[in-house]
Every structure is written in C-alpha cells, then in structure tokens.
Amino acid sequence: MSNSTSPTSPASEDLSQQYSLYETCELINASNPVYLEDLHQQLDHLDYLDENALINMAYEPSAPSKKPPLSVSNVLEGLVQLATTGAVGATEIIEAIHSEILLRPLGRFNEDHLNRWQQGVTRRLYNVVRYTMQSVGRGVTSSSMQLYRRSLINQKRRLLPERLKQLVNVINGMVGDHLVARDNPLAVPMVLYDRYGQPLGAKADPLCGRVIVLCHGLCLSYLSWHPCEEDSLGEHIALSVPKSTVLYLDYNTGRRISQNGHNLANLLQQLVIKNPDITQIDLVGYSMGGLVSRSALFYGEQERQDWVARVGNLVTIGSPHQGAILERISYHLLDIMAKVPFAGSLSKLGDIRSAGIIDLRHGCIRDEDWKGLKVRDVLPEDFRHPTKLPRHINTFFIAGSIAEGVYESKASNLVGDGLVMIESALGEAGKTHENHHLYVPEGRKAVFYGVNHINLQYDERVHNQVSEWLQANRDSESALKPRIQSFPDEIEVVV
C-alpha cells in the first residue's frame, strides 16, 4: 500500500514557497504570534500539489453517493482484492527492509544507491512477485464471483448481516482511503438510515418537521447506535423530542474528515431539496462524527447551502476537537522508528493506517490542512487552519473522564476518557493555539466522570443530557449556567 508519485506540475513552485513560509513563521511566531493569522491567509491562495494521485482522486468532493449499501457479494469480492493488495504492500515493506540490510552495512544506504536499486535485478524480481500476486488475485476474484453469482441467480440482493456490516466498517476505518483509491467494493458509501435500519432512498416517505442526524465515530457504523433498542440514544431522543425524525449516518471513516464533511454537506443539501418541509436539522456526533459534522457545517456555509440555515443544534460526544493523544503518540513513535538503523523500513507500516486516523492527530477538518503536502500527512499543529463554529447554532460539547472524581492534576486532564483529553473534547485550546479555541458557553459543556471513551456513546447519563439539550431547543438560558459535571451515582469525589 505504498504511495505512488504524481507527475510534477507548476504548482511545485508554490509548494516550495509554502514550506518557506512555514519556516519563516516558525522563526517569527515565538516573538510575534500575530503573523500566524497572516500566514493562513497567504496559504489559502496557494495552489496545492499532491504526491499521491490515486489517493487524492478519492478525496475530491463529490455529490451524494448513488452507490447502494454493500451486499454480501461486494464483501467477498472486496476481501479477495484487499488480501491481494495487502500482500503486495507487505512485499514492498520486505523489499525496503532487504535494501536497508544490504546497503547500510556498506555505507551505501542513500538516495543515489536506492535509485540504482530501483533499476537493478533484485527490484525486477520483486516486481515479478508483485505482478504475480496481482494476477492471481484478479483471477481468484473473477472465478469466485462467477460461482457466487450462479449460486444466487434466483435470489434477491442480500444485504449484510449486522456482524459482517460492523466488520466491514472496522476495515474501512483502518484502510478506508486505500479502498476508495483502488475502487475496492468494500468501501462504504455515505448513506442515511432510518430508525428501522432501512436506507433512506427515493421511495422513502417524505420527511417534515425536525430531523436529528446521528453520526458515528471511527471504525463504527450506524448499527453502533443500536437503533430500535429501548436504551439507545436514538430511541431516547425520539421519545424526548416529540414530532422529530431520527436518522443515522453511515460513512467510510478511513477517508479524510474534510472530504466526509464535503459529502455530508452535499447529502444534507439533497435531503432538504427532496424534503422541503424539513423545518430544523440537529447534528449529534460521537468522536470522529462530531468533527465530520463540524466540517460539513463549515463547507455548507462556504457554499451557501440551504440546509445550514435550518440547523438548530450541534452536540458532540467525546470528539477530539484539538486532536487525539493516541494518534500523536503513534506518530512520534513511528518518527523515532524511522531514524533507527535497520528498523526505519518498518516505519512504512504507519503508511497503511487510514487518512481519517491521521486527521485525528490535530482534529483537522479542512482540506487546507493536508492538501498541500508532498506526503500523506497533515500540517503541524502550529499551521492548522482555524475553523470557527457557526454563530446561529447552539453548540454543546460532552467530555468523558475515566476518573470518578475531579482531580487537581494535569494528568487527569491528559488521560481524559482514555483516548481524548477533556480540554480537547470541550474545544479548549492552550494560549499558544488560542486561535483554535472554540468559544462555547460553560453551561453548554458537560464532563462525565467514571466513563471511558467507548462507553460515552452508551452511558445513560449522557443520553439524558443530550435529550435534555435537544428538548430545550434554542434555549438561551443554558449559556448562563455553570459547566455541568456528572459523577457516578451522583457521588462527587474531590481531591
């Protein structure tokens, strides 16, 4: 799963200018941080260049997908293709290790000798192995699909069972951008489902009144909300907010967050065009789903789409608005590994993880945070583009903490819910990154103690709080209240 290099273009001169701007800003920002805002404005006017053409094609903004939900045949075909692609990717890592083992002891592990390696006999042998794997994979895929289609010739299209659907979404979360770039049938399309688990298609009954959209997190699916179960958040909202329609978004969490934001904006625009009687839209996002919702609002505003004006509330649950600590640790470990002799080639394993995971490092929700880079990465935190919240929307942030009480230490905040820091989930940035601070009134922030990141989605206290906020609907008094702090069994432990 290596990156392929795109042809050079005149934009490369702008890219060089961009990196020189970064270096200049690093020097002046320490003494005069006001220049950072000017830098962002200059970067916005530069043309961007991507090294990986295949991956970049998958990121282009698109209209709502017309691809139907995945079937069993899609999964079988996609798994065979994925196995072949994985074998080829493993071969490339083995070749990289092989070249390092041979060249480094001789003091020839440099760019010049690596270029010669590309033209040598050993490289040709590895190319034969890759070609053979791809040919075998195509043959197996073709024959297996023919047998499968014959066995189902008299049956209707089979949709995925729940467990298989959840497995497919996990694969999408891990390598979803690679699936899209290689046109793998396993790539999950963006689809809205109703509370009964049926895709919202052209034949669905017209929607009217208030619509509440639930957006899942990384490696999850719309089934992760457990629709139809009495103790689920969707059912809790449906009972608490009368005359509302709860919809569930399903999407490929391995793609760039900003591109999922583009697609969600377009999907909601088509929704209000087909259902003009929708009076209000509320967005509820868990983890990455909160970032995708914010990205959709940003691009919907930029493109002046009608649906944005109908949004009343945005609720995010454990969303890493200022980045996720786990991805930052992974990035630094891979960076260290790349500098260790004979282990540097293993750092290529980091290239396998999806772009969606990479975006979580700093909570990047805009195209400008990654499109100008020559490698599959995101801009450093100091150069991330700020994205403010729409003023007409009531925004609510929920954070979790694995501690069962308020502890006066930086460690408790850093640990947070185990994956996301409390400050990050509440949109709070430090003084050095004040332009990324999301100014949400204290009364619209809530911290739930004694609950980890995964259980935030299922915690009854969280369900009650989200329903209360949505039920109040555009209530301005909540902004004047103090921050909400919820403890297990309402027992407050303060150290």
Image (spheres, grey):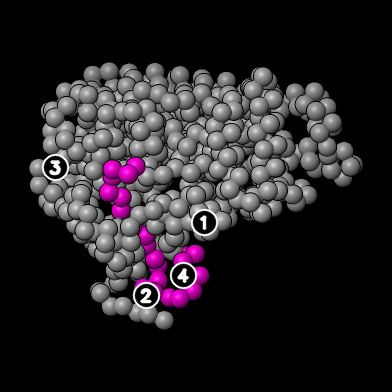
The circle drawn on residue 405 is 2
- Which of the 4 quarters of the picture holds residue 399? bottom left
Q: Which residue is at the far bottom?
A: 495
> Which kind of residue does numbered mark 1 sit on?
Ile
Report crowding for label 3: few under 14, some 14 to 19, many 20 or more residues within 10 A (C-alpha).
some
Q: What element carries label 4?
A: helix
Nearer-N-terminus badge (1/2): 1
Nearer-N-terminus badge (1/4): 1
Who's the residue at 65% across and 33% down the image? 18
Q: For marks 2 and 3, give the CA distance.
A: 36 Å
> Which kind of residue does numbered mark 3 sit on?
Ser
The circle drawn on residue 412 is 4
Nearer-N-terminus badge (4/2): 2
Nearer-N-terminus badge (4/3): 3
Q: For marks 4 and 2, give the CA distance.
A: 10 Å
Who's the residue at 23% across and 31% down the image? 199
Picture layout, residue 36 above or below residue 492: above
Say left or right for 257 vs 340.
Answer: left
Q: Is mark 2 on a helix, strand or loop?
A: loop
462 falls in the magenta region = no
Depth check, front residue: 223 or 256: 256
Who's the residue at 67% across and 19% down the image? 10
The circle drawn on residue 325 is 1
Q: For marks 3 and 1, give the CA distance.
A: 36 Å
Depth check, front residue: 429 or 343: 429
405 falls in the magenta region = yes
Location of mark 3 (residue): 244
